[in-house]
Amino acid sequence: MFDRSIHSYSVLSDSRRIIAISDIHGNLPVFKKLLRKIAFDPEKDALFLVGDLLEKGPYNLETLYYIMELSRHPHVHPMIGNCDVVCRNVLYDTRLEFLQNILLNRPNSILHEMAQRVGQRIDKETDMAALSRELRKVFLRELTFIDRLPHVIETERFIFAHAGIRDEKTYGRDMRDIMVQDLFMKEAGSFHKYIVVGHLPVSEYRKDICCFNPIIDTRRHIISIDGGNEVKSAGQLNALIYEQGRFQFACSDDLKKARITRDILPVNRTPFFITWHEGQVHMLHDEGACCLCRHEASGKVMHIAKEFLFYKGKELHACDFTNYQIPARCGDLVKIVSQTRNAVLVKKQGLMGWIPADALALES
């Protein structure tokens, strides 16, 4: 059974804003930008950082030091996520061969940064046991800080857990129920308190129009807030804000800005989005820049640009592809995700879709 000792209970004043942010993934500039945007005040607000503080982004040690400093305030509550567990692997010499294989395919990691600070690098020849001993000598305070972070934090109204819980009494059978419970919002039941989770980008719950904004299910009391920061090309870092009985949110990213130069009318009658979990497609015809494909999970046939296609073993997959064309008005602000010869994939108020290339002007 899951050890409830690795959780904490926090009593909050109704006068405080409650702010939840998950999956910072070592992107310190976007995190700081978001805190400025919401005018975060550690003396007046309660901030919950719902795991995956590190890994995959470029500023892991800087992010960790910044969070360690923030956590000196009594109402700043960092939590551990599955990606942060790499620090435990080093601290306790556990699954080092598995860890090495992960790091060989993850160029941005706090362990790469730590290794560089002690004049080493992690490759196929690295003695991981010897490296772990060296990192513990130099970074014991940092590794221990991550190790001691709670898995679950409960308040009068909320339960914060990185990926999900099984129930409100025991939380789960083991750590995996808290840290890596994929598709929690799709598969979970209902709860009395609001369960606030990250871990899985909210776009994975979309089937028609891709959106990276938090999902708030008021009937089942589940809130999913991972905006895909550092793991999705159009991802964003979300802040869920609860104040005076109302939910709001804000977001930040580092995508380039552009303005719409003419009105774009809606043209999609059946918009469609392909997620990670249901990405397998079958190629029907290669047409050069794109392929005519059948999406296996839905049976839909569509043209998919080749930059969205890749192989998992022998299976062809499409990831984060949409046929949605965003309606917009002249002067609207959008964020640029990627571009083909005739169209630009953009994000507008958290929604992702296509705009004609000749209808955009880059912001300086």
Image (cartoon, rainbow, N blue to C red):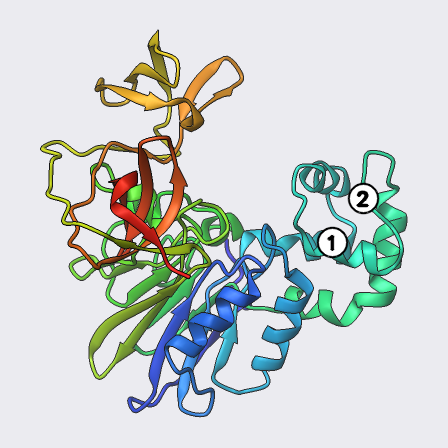
Mark number displayed over residue 73? none
Q: Residue at x 23, y 22 (%)?
A: 298
Q: Residue at x 67, y 52 (%)?
A: 109
Quadrant of res 119 = bottom right
Q: Residue at x 87, y 35 (%)?
A: 125
* Image coords of residue 332 (percent x, y): 22, 58
Hey, what amino acid is under mark 2? Ile
Q: Is 92 positioned to the left or the right of 131 in the image?
A: left
* Image coords of residue 105 (percent x, y): 66, 37
Q: Secondary structure at mark 2?
A: loop
The answer to whether residue 211 is visible is no
**Of residues 241 and 341, which is closer to you in this image?**
341
**Of residues 291 and 298, which is closer to you in this image?**
291
Pointer 1 with pointer 2, Cβ within 8 A: yes
- In this rendering, the answer to whether 247 lies above or below 27 is below
Hey, what amino acid is under mark 1? Leu
- In this rendering, the answer to whether 136 lies above or below 340 is below
Mark number displayed over residue 122? 2
The answer to whether residue 294 is visible is yes
Q: Is 143 positioned to the left or the right of 11 in the image?
A: right
**Of residues 303 and 205, which is closer to you in this image?**
303
* Image coords of residue 209 (percent x, y): 22, 41
**Farthest top residue in view:** 285
* Image coords of residue 185 (percent x, y): 30, 49
N-terminal of the pair, mark 1 or mark 2, is 1
- In this rendering, the answer to whether 36 lies above or below 258 is below
Density class for disc 1 (Cα within 10 Å; few <14, some 14-19, many ≥20) is many
Q: Which residue is disc 1 drawn over?
A: 111
CA separation, marks 1 and 2? 8 Å
Density class for disc 2 (Cα within 10 Å; few <14, some 14-19, many ≥20) is some
Q: Secondary structure at mark 1?
A: helix
